[in-house]
Image (cartoon, rainbow, N blue to C red):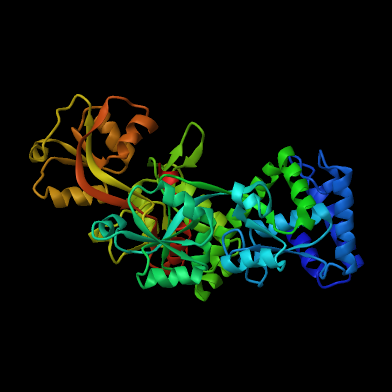
């Protein structure tokens, strides 16, 4: 529905003022109906905002008259933004993102189209001064700026991040040999915020556009480029830029801004809307559109072959097989009668990004060896966790990056003595059949003669609980399976090996395209937060 509103707004710019006005009124009616269920006020007319004065109403009516009669030069406002996750070109050549949705709301609120447009930073500031640009949502309010601009309170909040070429030399290592060279957009508050937070001296470089920032990153003229978090999207086209949060965390609040005093009543009225619950509406729009941007970012990375795969797959779910006892990656929770785990939460996020769906084809009694066989036979296209190992290379595929890393460990009861590695050969060790844990144990302790193999984690843990074995070869995280999942206290990680393993989605070798699609999607999922 919001897309319909935006369509009317854009079309209105090319139509007569009365026709455009009529379409805006119709779109407003649809917007009112759609928003009546919201728990916070969503204003659809500036007249409904608490505190709006008769003088402000008269000023907006006069402004509308000038806009619709042509005496203002055009019948719409230009709302300028830098290319970012808040404003980006979609597949149809239009502008999507929070800024477009914010313009929809402003258009409905005042009955005058607000049209988003993309500008580089220097051109945007010049456009505000010349009148080419009417409004922007790029500037952070400061006392100095309020002397020059008319600015609302915050319409959005952004963190400060820095951009670097992926795989570049560590900044701390560079700093040992020379001062770091940090670039900023000239005249931004980001420069002041970051420079005041830095402890060590750096060489600041001031620039006016993102193309220059990328060129200087590539030729090592600068070590990092700092800007607000939404600006990372401007580098999506290059595919070799990594954005990282600056620590200590810094946040910038941007305002609706104009330099034209004739538009001061709009600033005042929007401020009153924000004060009376409108800020919650904008926060909701912002969060919705960030999800939309991630989908956009995902799809522009796809090859034509991958796009065809997703299109042909349609609503047909992809078959997967899940372990019932692999806490916390994927497991069946018998109390809540649900399949849960880190991998399942990540799959849910991948579904949102890709439009693909997944369907479990096994039940809560299927043991690990059978799950692995289902993957080999291509009955299951993937499984939530398959640890890469030497023996498995060539027989399966994995996503490019793991979603979790952990250390191999030998688990024991808390009363069992702490062992040195040279004492492991005297202990009775439980191994899980066909697991990477068992494969690694046999590589590390090739002459060990006192092992017992179990078909599942739970059966191995049960033997440990009963004292039938001394140790279970697993991982440090698997200790949580005993203490959290089985709710059995009294166990510990006896030896934590200085050797990590990586949890990754595993695929049948016929699923090359699906594996590539999921690798690209997983990069856009906050797997660290989900895992932690």
The image quadrant where one finds the C terminus is top left
Q: Residue at x 27, y 37 (%)?
A: 460
Image side of residue 32 versus residue 463, left or right: right
Q: Position of residue 277 (x, y in %)?
A: 72, 39
Give the total number of marks visible in the rendering. Answer: 0
- State the image quarter where residue 505 is shown: bottom left
Image side of residue 132 versus residue 194, left or right: right
Q: Residue furthest bottom?
A: 304
The image quadrant where one finds the N terminus is bottom right
Question: Relative to 204, is 307 above or below?
Answer: below
Q: Is residue 93 in sight in this rendering?
A: yes
Q: Is residue 89 in sight in this rendering?
A: no
Q: Position of residue 351 (x, y in %)?
A: 54, 55
Question: Relative to 403, is 326 above or below?
Answer: above
Q: Residue at x 51, y 62 (%)?
A: 186
Which one is nearer the viewer's eye here, 177 or 329? 177
Which one is nearer the viewer's eye here, 254 or 280? 254
- State the image quarter where residue 86 is shown: bottom right
Image side of residue 459 versus residue 205, left or right: left
Which one is nearer the viewer's eye here, 360 or 277? 277
Q: Position of residue 244 (x, y in %)?
A: 42, 54
Q: Position of residue 458 (x, y in %)?
A: 33, 37
Which one is nearer the viewer's eye here, 331 or 118? 118
């Amino acid at each position: 529905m919001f897309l319909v509103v935006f369509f009317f707004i854009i079309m209105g710019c090319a139509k007569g003022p009365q026709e455009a006005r009529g379409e805006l009124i119709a779109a407003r009616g649809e917007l009112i109906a759609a928003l009546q269920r919201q728990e916070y006020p969503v204003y659809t007319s500036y007249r409904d905002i608490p505190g709006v004065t008769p003088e402000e109403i008269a000023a907006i009516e006069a402004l509308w008259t000038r806009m619709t009669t042509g005496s203002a030069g055009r019948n719409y406002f230009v709302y300028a933004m830098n290319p970012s996750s808040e404003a980006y070109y979609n597949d149809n050549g239009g502008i999507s993102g929070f800024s477009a949705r914010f313009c929809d709301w402003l258009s409905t609120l005042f009955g005058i189209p607000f049209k988003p447009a993309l500008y580089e930073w220097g051109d945007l500031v010049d456009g505000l001064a010349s009148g080419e640009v009417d409004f922007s949502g790029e500037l952070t309010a400061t006392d100095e700026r309020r002397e020059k601009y008319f600015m609302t309170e915050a319409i959005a909040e952004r963190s400060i991040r820095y951009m670097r070429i992926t795989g570049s030399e560590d900044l701390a290592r560079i700093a040992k040999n020379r001062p770091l060279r940090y670039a900023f957009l000239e005249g931004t508050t980001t420069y002041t915020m970051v420079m005041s937070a830095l402890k060590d001296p750096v060489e600041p470089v001031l620039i006016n556009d993102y193309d220059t920032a990328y060129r200087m990153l590539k030729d090592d003229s600068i070590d990092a480029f700092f800007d607000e978090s939404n600006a990372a999207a401007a580098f999506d086209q290059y595919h070799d830029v990594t954005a990282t949060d600056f620590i200590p965390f810094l946040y910038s609040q941007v305002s609706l801004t104009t330099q034209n005093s004739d538009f001061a009543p709009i600033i005042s009225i929007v401020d009153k809307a924000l004060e009376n619950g409108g800020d919650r509406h904008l926060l909701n729009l912002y969060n919705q559109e960030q999800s939309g941007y991630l989908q956009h970012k995902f799809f522009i990375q796809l090859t034509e072959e991958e796009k065809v795969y997703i299109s042909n797959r349609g609503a047909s779910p992809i078959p997967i097989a899940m372990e019932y006892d692999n806490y916390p990656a994927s497991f069946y929770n018998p109390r809540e009668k649900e399949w849960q785990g880190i991998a399942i939460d990540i799959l849910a996020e991948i579904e949102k990004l890709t439009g693909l769906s997944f369907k479990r084809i096994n039940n809560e009694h299927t043991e690990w060896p059978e799950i692995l066989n289902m993957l080999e036979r291509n009955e299951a296209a993937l499984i939530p966790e398959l640890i890469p190992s030497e023996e498995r290379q060539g027989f399966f595929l994995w996503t490019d990056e793991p979603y979790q890393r952990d250390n191999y460990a030998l688990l024991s009861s808390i009363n069992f003595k702490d062992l040195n590695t040279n004492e492991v050969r005297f202990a009775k060790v439980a191994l899980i059949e066909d697991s990477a844990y068992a494969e690694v144990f046999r590589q590390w302790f090739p002459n060990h003669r006192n092992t017992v193999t179990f078909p599942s984690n739970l059966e191995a843990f049960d033997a440990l609980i009963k004292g039938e074995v001394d140790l279970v070869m697993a991982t440090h995280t698997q200790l949580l399976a005993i203490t959290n999942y089985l709710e059995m206290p009294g166990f510990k990680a006896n030896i934590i090996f200085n050797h990590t393993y990586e949890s990754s989605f595993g695929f049948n070798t016929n699923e090359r395209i699906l594996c590539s699609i999921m690798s690209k999607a997983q990069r856009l999922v906050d797997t660290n937060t989900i895992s932690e």
